[in-house]
Image (cartoon, grey):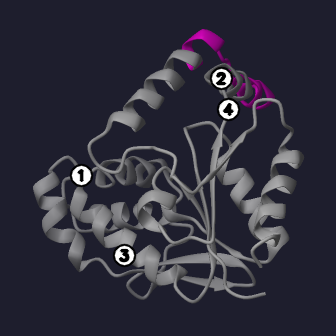
Amino acid sequence: MKPITVAIDGPAGAGKSSVAKAVSQRMGIDYLDTGAMYRAMGLYMLINAVPIADEAAVAEYCGQARIGVTYDGGVQHTWLGDADVSQAIRTEQCSSAASGVSKVPQVREILVEAQRRIAAGHGVVMDGRDIGTRVLPDAAVKIFLTASPQVRARRRCDEMAAKGQAADYDTILRDIQARDYQDTHRAASPLKKAEDAVEVDTSEMSLEEVIAAICRLVEAVV
């Protein structure tokens, strides 16, 4: 198969990561976990005692972080300098740090450029909120994965219940609606459907139906 890039965008709770990973496995295309790269940047700041809340300091130091990605048997390994930090970044502290550094424009510029280099000539499946519009504007396949806020809230409730966690539907629905507004109105790379993206509304679809539909779109351009 020739190298092919697949961009999957959509609102929070649409199931982008689950779908992207499944499409990656079925189509034999590496999945690029961009969130891991932001976690690695967050870890760099923590190691070097850079205050995450100080955007100016993060902007000053982010250019010094050497963040890379390799694949071994289709499994992504994330590197910080010469260290494989694939496990080290999976902490709540790194998650919180990633959320903080991702707000800094200079961090996004550096990591977006890195993501483009990884995708060039290699082929990846990538999901997010601005992949098709900003990160991979020339992706061979662009998907805008969505579902109604009510369906996304119900799915989230079901997921939490399955884990034995308490979940209030109305609270989750309000959180999702607030997140949608925030994502579509933010100044930097707001969530929006690329003009040439195929919209897939999963409200009435099973996970398997969604995966199959996107795989067919990928097969059509291979």
Mark 1 or 3 closer to N-term? 1
Is disc 4 placed on a helix, strand or loop? loop
| Badge 2 amino acid | Ala
Front disc: 4 or 1:
4
Residue that numbered label 2 is attached to: 153
Q: Residues within 10 Å of mark 3 (few under 14, many from 20)?
A: few
| Badge 4 amino acid | Ala
Residue that numbered label 4 is attached to: 147
Residue that numbered label 3 is attached to: 113
- Residue shown at the point (45%, 30%) measured from the top left: 179
Mark 3 or 4 closer to N-term? 3
Is disc 3 placed on a helix, strand or loop? helix
| Image spot of residue 167 (x, y percent) | 66, 17
Mark 4 or 1 closer to N-term? 1
Give the magenta part as a residue range: 157-172
Nearest the eye: 56 or 146? 146
| Image spot of residue 161 (x, y percent) | 76, 24
